Amino acid sequence: MPNYKLTIEYNGADFSGSQVQSRDLSEIEEAKPRTVQGELEKALKIYFRTSENIVTNFSGRTDAGVHAIGQVVNFKIDDELLSSVSSEYENIIEENPDKFLIGLNGILPEDLVLVKVKRVADEFNARFDAKSREYLYKIFVRRHKPVLRLDSLTWVKEPLDFDAMAAHAKKFLGKQDFADYSKPDEQLNSTECNVLEAELIKESKICFKFRIKADRFLRHMVRRIVGELIEVGKRVAAGEKYDPEHFAFISESGFNQELVKIKINKSAPAEGLTLMKLEY
């Protein structure tokens, strides 16, 4: 049973997240709710002309509205199934990957595209073999709303202090417990993540980009981190004093703990977030 690795891109605006919420075949066929995985598996079934469900394995879940240009997926398909359908499908990915890409992309919807495919070792698992994942969050800072690329960035109309946000971003580096930055999940054995890189980039006076790379991410983790960064930027720009060494605001009575509340209650919108790449 050959194992194939796919790299896909998608605009998450009209998806209810990346992965199916049920393995009921009829729900996948009807795409209720519409997910990236559901659309991909439907396209694979059509391409290979089979009534059997071809199960895909994603590197990780992205929420509704979140985009990806480097999502990795793997799937296995039985050799006997391929040969029984048509001989033209035997070894097609190894011998003519471009034909496979063109064929499948002709079936996929416009907001989802397959960009790479290759055969990998039988034991390869897109989720468990990933060494790191990288996300990018785009923030547009201007009093007036932008009219372009609204589905791939977040608009903040209040002024933001870039230096304070950049300093605060360093708080998230290293191995630590990110439970306060995630949606509760009883299935998780650990909420510890190792953040390898975290930086705020000023592309222009009105465009900030937050890049973060880690061995794993919890649900809503990046959006809650960005929500805290935005709150820091707003408060410092409004005149509050901030100590970058302690990642805290200064009051007359000393350092306060208001940021604890900020990180729990503030979450940046999904549309500004994109899964960029994975390393294996």
Image (tube, helix red, strand yellow):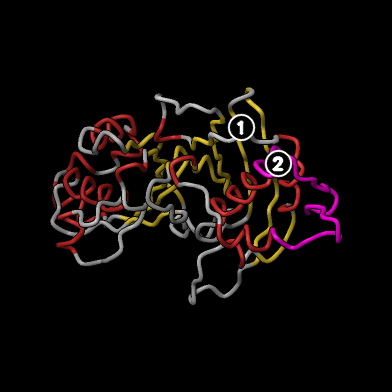
Which residue is found at the position 27% from the left and 30% from the top?
102
201 to the left or right of 280: right
Residue 39 highlighted magenta (yes or no):
no
Give the vertical position of 84 relative to 180 (above or below).
above
143 to the left or right of 253: left
In the foreground, 242 or 132: 242
In the foreground, 143 or 276: 143
Tags 2 and 1 touching, CB below 8 Å: yes
**Identity, as a three-letter code, of the amino acid under mark 2:** Met
Q: Earlier in the sequence, mark 2 or mark 1?
A: 2
Please rate how many residues cluster around mark 2, counting C-alpha atoms within 10 Å: few if below 14, some from 14 to 19, many from 20.
many
Q: Secondary structure at mark 1?
A: strand
Taking the view exactly as shown, the residue that stands out farthest to the front is 252
Q: Picture coordinates of residue 31 (x, y %)?
A: 20, 54
Provide the residue span drawn in magenta: 233-258
Q: Secondary structure at mark 2?
A: helix
Give the vertical position of 72 relative to 201 (above or below).
below
Where residue 165 is drawn, which disc sits there? 2
Q: Picture coordinates of residue 187 (x, y %)?
A: 48, 75
Cα separation between marks 2 and 1: 10 Å
Image quadrant where residue 28 sits = bottom left
Which residue is found at the position 50% from the left and 65% from the top?
183
Which residue is found at the position 16% from the left and 46% from the top?
46
Q: Picture coordinates of residue 166 (x, y %)?
A: 73, 39
Where residue 6 is drawn, which disc sits there? none
Where residue 208 is drawn, which disc sits there? 1
Total label count? 2
Can residue 79 be spotted in the picture?
Answer: yes
Residue 242 highlighted magenta (yes or no):
yes
Q: Picture coordinates of residue 14 (x, y %)?
A: 29, 43
Which residue is found at the position 78% from the left and 61% from the top?
256
**Identity, as a three-letter code, of the amino acid under mark 1:** Phe
